[in-house]
Image: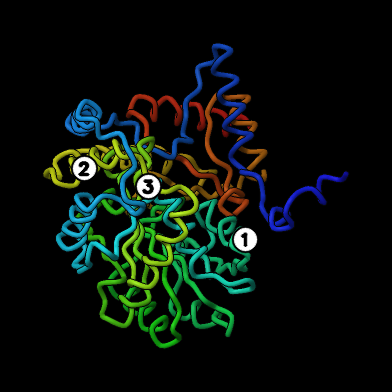
Amino acid sequence: MRIDIRLAKRLKKINPSATLAITAKAKKLNSEGRDIVSFAAGEPDFDTPGFIKDAAIAAIHAGFTKYTPTTGTLELKKAIVEKLKKDNSLQYDPSQIVVSCGAKHSIFNALFALLNKGDEAIIATPYWVSYPEMVNLCEGVPCFIKTTAENGFKITAADLEKYITPKTKVVILNSPSNPTGCVYTDEELRQIAKICAEKRIFVISDEIYEKLIYDNQKHLSIASFGKEIYDLTVTINGLSKSYSMTGWRIGYMAAPADISEAVSKIQDHTTSNPTSISQKAAVAALNAPDDFTKSMAAEFQKRRDYAIERLSKIKKIGFIKPKGAFYIFCDISKVRLDSRTFANRLLEEAYVSLIPGIAFGMDKYVRISFAASIEQIGKGMDRLEGWLNKL
C-alpha cells in the first residue's frame, strides 16, 4: 500500500523543518570533535534561576505529582492574571486563561479553535517557522504578506487592508519577532487593531519574547487597545524565553471566554493538563520580582550591540538593528548563495552554525542568534568574516 494512501491527506501540506538538517549536521560535527560556534540557538543560554528549580523540587517532595485541572491550576491562573494586569494593562478572569504545554501548543490550540477548512490566516513574511504549518494542520490557508527591511519587517495597515478577503479569519502577530527582532509601535498596533475590529478579524498575538526588549522600549499588547479588539484577540505568552524555562513547557493564552472554553475542550481530549511540577515552578517565577529577566535582557542587549558592531564591518552582509528577542536577520543577497547553501558551507568550512532564511520564508537571509557568550560571538564573527572574505 502506498504511503500517501496510508497517511492523512492533511499531512501532504506539512513541510519538514528547514532547520533540522543543519542542526543535525552541526551536532554530528560537534560529536566528531569539531569546535562548532552556534548562532542557531532558539533559546536563552542562561540556566533556569535557582528559586524556580527549588519550587519544582519542593512540589515533588510535597507529592504535587498528580493530574491538575486541564487548563491549569487556579493558583497559576491567578498569577497569570496578575502578570497581565501589571505588565500589559489587560484584565482577565482566571476562567479566560488556558495554560498549555508551551506557547507553541497555545498557538496551535487557538488556531484549531478558530479556523474552519478554507479560512485564511494572514502571516507576515518572514515568519516563525511553525505558523504556516500549524495553519495547514488546522486545514486553514496561510496568506503571506511579504515585509521588507525598509518597513522594519512589519505588516503595515495598508498591507493588511490589501490582503484581507471575505475568507480572512485570523491575523498572527509576533512582537518582538522571531526571526527579525522587530517590535510594533503604539501607532502601528492601533492601526492594525482598528482594521481588525472593523472587519471582525481575530488576532493571535504571540508575545513570548515580551521581556527581551531593548533601548528602553515598552512592549505593548494589542488587546489593550479597547474592548473591540480585546474581544477579538488571543494573547499568547509563556515562560520559556523570559525565565529561560524552555524545557519546562509552560505557555498560556488569555482569550475571550468562548475561545478559552473551546480550547479547554480541545485540551481535555489531547494533552490534558501541563506538567503539575512545571506549574508550581511557573507560579514561583511569576510571583517573583523581575530581577532575573531584567538582568538577562541587559546582557542580551550588550551581546546584540557587540554582534551588530562586528556585522557592520562585514560588507557582504546587511541587517537592521533588532529591537527585541535575540536574533539578527541578515541579508546575504550580495553573497549570491541561497540560504541553505550559505548555512551548509559556513558550517562545513568554518564551523559556524546558523539558520537559513528559507525556514522563515525568505531565502536571501539567514538568522543569527546572539544567545551565546560575548567570547563565542567574537569567535563566530571572526570565522564568518574570514570565510566570507575567501568566497
Q: Which amino acid does label 3 sit on?
A: Asn
Residue 298 position within the rendered picture, expressed as x and y whole percent measured from the top left: 21, 41
Separation of marks 2 and 1 at Cα, in angstroms = 34 Å
Q: Mark 3 points at which residue?
A: 273
Lateral position of residue 210 relative to residue 15, left or right: left
Does residue 245 appear in this view? yes
Q: What residue type is labelled 2?
A: Thr
Relative to the observer, which residue lies in front, 58 or 118?
58
Answer yes or no: do the residues labelled 2 and 3 have beta carbons within 8 Å? no
Looking at the rendered image, the disc whose residue lies closer to the viewer, 2 or 1, is 1
Of the two numbered discs 2 and 3 on the same chain, state the one appearing first in sequence.
3
Answer yes or no: do the residues labelled 1 and 3 have beta carbons within 8 Å? no
Q: Name the residue under label 1.
A: 136
Residue 97 position within the rendered picture, expressed as x and y whole percent measured from the top left: 30, 60
Of the two numbered discs 2 and 1 on the same chain, state the one appearing first in sequence.
1
- Neighbor class of circle 1 (other Cα within 10 Å; few <14, some 14-19, many 20+) is many
- Neighbor class of circle 3 (other Cα within 10 Å; few <14, some 14-19, many 20+) is many
Residue shown at 35% from the left, 56% from the top: 176
Lateral position of residue 354 relative to residue 211, left or right: right
Q: What element carries label 2?
A: helix
**In which quadrant is the C terminus drawn?**
top right
**In which quadrant is the N terminus drawn?**
top right
Separation of marks 1 and 3 at Cα, in angstroms = 25 Å
Give the quarter of the image for residue 81.
bottom left
Residue 293, label in figure:
2
Relative to the observer, which residue lies in front, 272 or 385?
272
Residue shown at 57% from the left, 62% from the top: 135
Lateral position of residue 142 relative to residue 101, left or right: right
